[in-house]
Image (tube, rainbow, N blue to C red):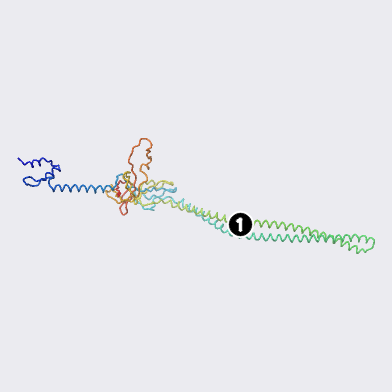
Amino acid sequence: MPPKADIEAQQIPQGSVEGATDSVETSPQGGTPASGLANPRTRRFLIAFLLFLLVGGILAWRYYAFRETTDDAQIDGDIYAISARITGHAIKVNAENNDLVKAGTVLVELDPRDYEVALDHALGDLANAQAVAAAASVGVPITSVTTSSQETAAAADTRNAEAAIAAAEKQQQAAEARVAEAEANDVKAQTDLQRYAQLVAKLEISQQQYDYAVATANGTAAVLRAARAEAVAARQEVSEAHARLAQKQAQLRGTQTAPQQVAVSRARAESAQAAVQTAQAAVEQARLNLEYTKIVAPVDGIVGQKSVEAGENVQPGQALMAVVPINDLYVTANFKETQLKNMRPGQVATIHVDAYNRDYRAHVLNIAGATGERFSLLPPENASGNYVKVIQRVPVKIVFDPGQNTQILRPGMSVEPTVITK
């Protein structure tokens, strides 16, 4: 019959730690140590393994607690739509779908002849406007000098006319005095003639004396008539002098509008200069239209969606093709709103590209201002109908770090970004 201690040791379950602790005791015979958990080495190994799992769990938690990842992400890029800015006839198309083009490459050429003619016409209008402006600008000082000279001459003529009136009036006064003198002389001569006629009838005087009296009377009458004629002429001269003065005063008033005439001339010059600017603008527009006959690539990229062929007539705004840049790609990651608690711009990120099974270095650029649903065509209206709470997704823009080969990437490729939020 086995000892009692051995029987009790056999009854302890192998998985029980307490049994393992109790079975540490050696057999009464002093044999080898007990096997299994009763072995101290086994216990130490178990404790070390548990510590390893604990430390590994803590490290794993610390690793994944500061990382946010999503598979709702894709590569994006700004697609440049190439369109015509003018009406024209396509004479040459230099790019096909999937062609790699450089910025400035001529993609489509329109017939330039109509626009070359328009440019020549605009240049002719500009030359004409410049000639008119030059003549108008020269006319301003000429008008100023001419009107000033005319005003000075008119003022001098007015003064001369006033002096001529004064002289004419003096002459009139002298003529009237001569008329008075001639009248007095004529009256005396006529009176003497009457007396001499009576005396000659009585033969008191000689016939010679009477004839002398007759001649004197006739002479004084002629002098009187001449004096009266001179007086009439003097009065006429005074009237004419007044008329000339009125004329010169009118001319003087006309020349006093010199400032207004200069202002009008200057306004004409400014109008001509404005016409030059208008013609210059027309020339620039014609040059631009001529340049628009060559439609160039705005950026380096790959051509797609080509819809134009040589021989077609294109209209302004008509889409001809698209250019997809491959040097400015980024990632749009739609993270759940619950993943954005610690996410900030500038945080480091890793982009795993499914197509090539490789990772790229990147960083968060910014976070969208609203959820994706708010930017959809028909945003939800939670105020109406039954409301079901759904975790929303917010677009986050992640850009690639420089120095990596991103030219093999294409917009629309699926990626899995991981953002380190610590």
Q: Position of residue 179 (x, y in %)?
A: 81, 60
Q: Residue furthest left?
A: 1
Q: Amino acid at mark 1?
A: Pro
Determine crowd level at label 1: few under 14, some 14-19, many 20+ residues with C-alpha closer than 10 A.
some
Residue drawn at (61%, 57%), measured in percent from left and top? 259
Query: Residue 200 appears in which quarter of the rendering?
Result: bottom right
Residue 329 is at least partly visible in this image: no
Which residue is label 1 attached to?
A: 259
Q: Residue furthest top?
A: 385
Q: Position of residue 219 (x, y in %)?
A: 85, 62
Residue 259 is at least partly visible in this image: yes
Residue 204 falls left or right of residue 16: right
In what element is the residue under mark 1?
helix
In front of the other: 183 or 420: 420
Residue 355 falls left or right of residue 49: right
In front of the other: 358 or 343: 343
Look at the image and tell me in which quarter the N terminus lies: top left
Q: Position of residue 336 (x, y in %)?
A: 32, 43
Q: Position of residue 119 (x, y in %)?
A: 48, 53
Query: Residue 372 appears in which quarter of the rendering?
Result: top left
Label total for image:
1
From the viewer's perspective, is residue 229 above or below residue 88? below
Residue 294 falls left or right of residue 61: right
